[in-house]
Image (tube, grey):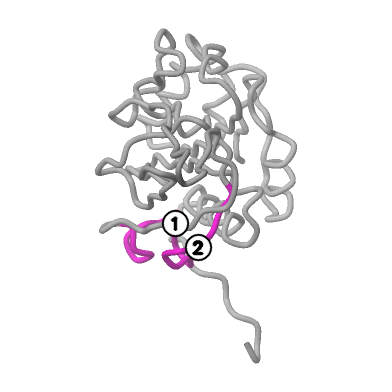
């Protein structure tokens, strides 16, 4: 059973639709004490980093404890940013801190008409350890797969980045460290590539190796 964390800033409707389409069992826990009964956690999110202040305290402690105990955690968009130490968007609000580094504002490029916020489809650039055979979250995908972004802040490219993308500057698009996973884009709005990423996380939650979907006969 997947715990879909609701802290008032997540696009839960579209994430629920994607999980339902993939046949996943999920629920929205009412209190942090319930997290111990779930096999994996998803923290979605849209908007300002200050919204994650709702997680400071018991929720942050419970999620951190679950991750340290080996429970898989998947952060989406703002939820991925929250995996880091913090964000310049709301410097007073701590992140979960399971990944090193801070989230910063994208600069854009007026000359190239690359505006902020960054909204639209970008290709994933697999990093050296982000090949499908190395990344459980990217299994079944090829470098260049397009996914849908909408954000103004982004995480740096660190050793935990398995795929990056560029919008005037290069930033982390997919991160992965042990049982911690995150994507800056919205996989639930990213067509087949996004559904494959969610499917891969569900396989991790089941304790199975992520694999590419089998092709239809004659394809």
The residue lying at 28 percent from left, 29 percent from top is 100
The overriding secondary structure of the stretch rendered in magenta is loop
Q: Position of residue 89 (x, y in %)?
A: 46, 18
* Residue that label 1 marks: 124
User: Quick one: 115 or 89, which is closer to the camera?
Assistant: 115
Disc 2, SS: loop
| Left or right of residue 199, residue 91 in this image | left
> Where residue 143 sits: x, y (%)?
41, 64
Q: Residue at x 68, y 33 (%)?
A: 11
Looking at this view, name the residue that lies furthest to the bottom: 218
Q: How many marks?
A: 2
Q: Are marks 2 and 1 in contact (CB under 8 Å)?
A: yes
Residue under the point 30% across and 56% down: 127
Magenta region includes residue 102: no
Q: Which is more toward the observer, 68 or 217?
A: 217
Q: Which residues are magenta?
A: 130-148
Q: Is residue 122 above or below residue 75?
A: below
Residue 82 picture quarter: top left
User: Which element is circle 1 on?
Assistant: loop
Q: Residues within 10 Å of mark 2 (few under 14, many from 20)?
A: some
Q: Label 1 crowding class (10 Å Cα cut-off): few <14, some 14-19, many 20+?
A: many
* Residue 112 placement (x, y as % from top left): 47, 46
- The disc at residue 152 is none
Q: Is residue 195 left or right of residue 180?
A: right
- Residue 214 in percent (x, y) is at 57, 76
Q: Nearer the N terminus, badge 2 or badge 1?
A: 1
**Quarter of the image with the N terminus in it:** top right
As drawn, 60 above or below 181: above
| Residue occupied by mark 2 | 145
Q: Distance of mark 2 from mark 1, alpha carbons?
A: 6 Å
For the point 41% across and 32% down, the residue is: 107
- The image quadrant where one finds the C terminus is bottom right
């Amino acid at each position: 059973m997947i715990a879909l964390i609701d802290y008032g800033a997540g696009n839960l409707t579209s994430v629920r639709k994607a999980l339902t389409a993939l046949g996943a069992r999920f629920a929205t826990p009412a209190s942090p004490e319930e997290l111990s009964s779930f096999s994996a956690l998803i923290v979605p999110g849209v908007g300002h980093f200050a919204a994650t202040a709702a997680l400071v305290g018991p929720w942050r402690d419970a999620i951190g404890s679950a991750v340290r105990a080996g429970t898989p955690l998947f952060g989406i968009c703002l939820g991925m940013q929250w995996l880091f130490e913090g964000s310049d968007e709301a410097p007073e609000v701590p992140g979960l801190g399971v990944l090193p580094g801070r989230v910063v504002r994208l600069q854009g490029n007026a000359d190239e008409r690359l505006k902020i916020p960054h909204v639209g489809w970008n290709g994933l650039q697999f990093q050296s350890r982000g090949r499908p055979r190395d990344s459980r979250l990217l299994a079944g995908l090829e470098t260049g797969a397009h996914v849908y972004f909408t954000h103004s802040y982004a995480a740096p490219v660190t050793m935990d980045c398995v795929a990056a993308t560029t919008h005037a500057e290069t930033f982390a698009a997919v991160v992965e460290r042990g049982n911690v996973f995150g994507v800056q884009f919205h996989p639930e709005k990213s067509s087949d590539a996004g559904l494959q990423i969610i499917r891969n996380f569900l396989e991790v939650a089941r304790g199975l190796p992520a694999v590419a979907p089998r092709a239809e006969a004659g394809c």
